[in-house]
Amino acid sequence: MRNRQFTETLLTVENISLSFGGVRALSDISFDILKGEVRAIIGPNGAGKSSMLNCINGFYHPQQGAITYKGVRREQMRPHEAAEQGIARTFQNIALFKGMSTLDNIMTGRNLKMRSGIFAQALRWGPALREEIAHREYVERVIDFLEIQHVRKVPVGQLPYGLQKRVELGRALAAEPELLLLDEPMAGMNIEEKQDMCRFVLEVNEEFGTTICLIEHDMGVVMDISDRVVVLDYGRKIGDGTPEEVKANPEVIAAYLGTAH
């Protein structure tokens, strides 16, 4: 557990409610994310964690509530707006182009940074060529940072699961996000892979200054790397605070032991 102090609010979730037909996925959820912190969202399966991330970056539009990001309050945030304003996302199920190389997959994370038109990019001439070289240099720095130089030209479909998750993280980092949303970045990993991913998440936070909001089921990981934790259960918020505060919360304990309902 880390003990760091943050003062500036980057994002605020205000009274968010989300329903699909008659099913309530989120019910009156409020919390904030402070600039520079690692903020975890935890809870049992079906608690609404991924739905919450989908609301933050615009994949879902809540029926009630609003999200304030960098001082601007929005009833709805569309995915392209979120990306343009510095919110990047990885997914629970890996969403990579399996036939493309590691390098090319991470390059797709630079698309929003590119100013040249499609035809100029295709011709690779003049300013477009210089721009592509600059973007490739940045991507190569991301590849070096994530220690995946040895697979930079390998199609990602041929990579082991743990390396694919690292490539997906690299694609998100290529967008130079201010807020990075990680949906179960360590799911399905062995202990060694989890340790590597924990190290990279902390280094992204500390060296790049990137604010991170992550969903994670491994409570040991959450307690080790998070500054604050919000706990959801059946679409309700049942806890919010430091890892130590959350760990001692009776309602959180009951939910994880299966005795809350």
Image (cartoon, grey):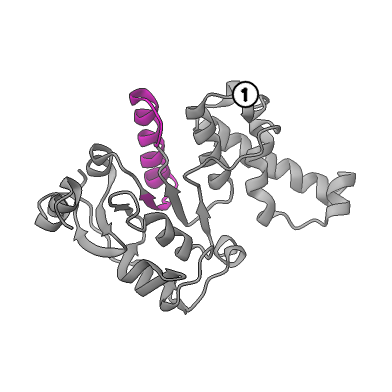
For the view shown, which residue lies furthest in the front direction?
22
Q: Could you tell me residue 88's position as x and y percent?
A: 52, 54
Tag 1's secondary structure? Answer: helix
Q: Dot 1, crowdedness within 10 Å: few (<14), some or many (≥20)?
A: few
Q: Vertically, is 109 above or below 158?
A: below
Q: What type is the residue that disc 1 sits on? A: Gln
**Quarter assignment of residue 139:** top right
**Can residue 32 be seen in this snapshot?**
yes
Viewport quadrant of the N terminus? top left
Magenta residue check for 200: yes
Nearest the camera: 119 or 261? 261
Viewport quadrant of the C terminus? bottom left
Q: Vertically, is 88 above or below 153?
A: below
Report which residue position mark 1 lands on.
Answer: 158
Task: Please give the range of residues in magenta.
Answer: 187-214
Residue that appears at 30% across and 71% down: 30
For the view shown, which residue lies furthest in the top direction?
150
Q: Is residue 81 left or right of residue 237?
A: right
